[in-house]
Amino acid sequence: MFMFLRVLFLLTFSLFAPLVIAEEPDHPLLTRYPGAEIDEWLYTEYEKVDLPTGPLDAGGNLHIDTLVGDLTRIVYEIESVSTLKVFENYRGALKESGAQLVSVCELDECGDKDSGLHELAASVAGVSYFGSNFYRKPYFLRASLSGAQGMVHVGLFVGGFDGDVRVQQVVVEEVPRQNTLISVSEEYLSRAHKDAATGDQRTAEEKKQDHPMMARYPGARLYRSRTVEYEKMSLPLTVLNSEGVASENLDLTGDITQHSYQIENVSTLKVFQNYLEAIEKLGFTLEYACEKAECGGDDASEALGERLAVTGDVENYFRDPHYLIASREVAEGRVVVGIYAGGFEGEVWLQQVVIEETGTENDLIEVNADQLYQEIERSGKALVYGIYFDTDSAEVKENSAEALEAISELMTSHPELDLYVVGHTDDTGESDYNLSLSGRRAASVAEVLTAQYSVESGRLAAAGVGPYAPVAGNESKEGKRLNRRVELVRRL
């Protein structure tokens, strides 16, 4: 790439320059008119952009070109100058550079405020135009020229108000599509748990934060995450209606991992296509997908994203939505991935959920009072797998009621029995942390049994041993599942 500078009129025009974002970043193709101030600025990688080819035709129709490329949209304000002088400088610079002027309109040729002028201006400016008074003495042009990687398209709308001028400038640079930016790990699905694919540029901390099956989009910042063992989740397979209900859902039960990432200066399209490529690379099958208007109106698309979001809220990030649900069968069951990419002001908020279906942990050992007592009589302890906690949490979940009722019945039926309530974890993470967590979980179980199930507090003593007393290897998910448990140990 080389720099080609040309000074024409009052503008400096440069071609094929690398994008440099300064404090007040002009596009390297067109520097600002002298004295101009940037009012708004937006850069988005690989965006789909609709640009008008000219003013409304005789039938009242606005013809649009749909372009895909790196988008730079800048709004300039210039004081004490005419729209004519500003426009002539832009047009002269583009013509002298060899750019092809696709369409030009001046003053009344562009229409008036009642016959398409606002539509023309808004189609160049986007949402920044709405409510603007800068449509007086209007000028418009569309131009194109060859760039380093493809065609470069320019759209300009120049309008005035009270002696000042506002320039709406759009540059779309065609670039090759990049769909291989996300690293994936086939080894995770085969439970080998090796590092992700080559080309992964994440830090050690980012790798720890991300799901081991799929890396984050390059440059993404983790905003929120949540992991829940053995929980229910329903994923929409259709657009949501006005009540936020889908006519078809994929109802799942398993281990759920959710991530919310924020990504700057990129389109929802580019992010989504990279996730789609990564998911297909792993052999997943699409269950449902939608993009933009296919996902419904603003309310429907926002509600769709909220179904995947960690906190159930996507805030303002539901513009230009892209959504998919995909699944794959693996040795231990089905793995389902949900992706929602929503945009706002040049940023993307990516909602990602991975659900790994498993059998119920209640089927590991029957949870009833008689069975528990038989285990204690035979070996001095009973293993309980029906008590649930969120990841890194010591709060007993509501779906633990069946196991807690069985323990309560055991204590009522055998008033001579005193117990240690012992918490165990798998070997994921730091051992000292797991030791502390297991103790806090055991204490929570004892507290719930005392407060809600009328078990005398003196009959229970809580302790935690973390990962130090496994009943299976921690190399597999099934082994970890067996090691995450509560034990009831006879206390003399």
Image: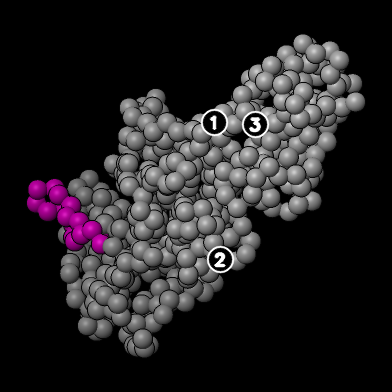
Q: Amino acid at mark 2?
A: Arg
Is residue 191 in sight in this rendering?
Answer: yes
| Span highlighted in magenta in the image | 51-67
| Label whose residue precedes the other's in the sequence (3 or 1) | 1
Q: Is residue 54 magenta?
A: yes
Q: Nearest the camera: 45 or 479?
A: 479
Q: Nearer the viewer, mark 2 or mark 1?
A: 1
**What secondary structure is found at the residue carrying circle 3?**
loop
* Residue 355 visible in the current orientation: no
Label number found at residue 369: none
Q: Quick one: 468 or 43, which is closer to the camera?
A: 468
**Residue 328 included in the magenta stretch of the image:** no
Q: Which numbered disc covers residue 385?
A: 3
Q: Main structural element of the magenta stretch: helix, strand or loop?
A: loop
In the rendered image, residue 355, in percent from the top left (x then y), is placed at 48, 41
Q: Quadrant of the N terminus?
A: bottom left
Tell me, yes or no, whether the two marked residues, 3 and 1, touch with CB atoms within 8 Å. Answer: no
Mark 2 lies on residue: 202
Q: What is the x, y in percent for residue 173?
A: 31, 70
Structural crowding at the residue carrying mark 1, measured as other residues with C-alpha within 10 Å and reported as few (<14), some (14–19) or many (≥20): few
Q: Residue at x 25, y 54 (%)?
A: 120
Report the residue at 80% width, 39% height from top. 464
Q: Are marks 3 and 2 in contact (CB under 8 Å)?
A: no
Residue 33 vs residue 88: left or right? Answer: right
Direction from residue 112 to residue 227 in the image, left or right: right
Which one is closest to the eye, mark 3 or mark 2? Answer: 3
Nearest to N terminus: mark 2 or mark 1: 2
371 lies above or below 34: above
Q: Residues within 10 Å of mark 2 (few under 14, many from 20)?
A: some
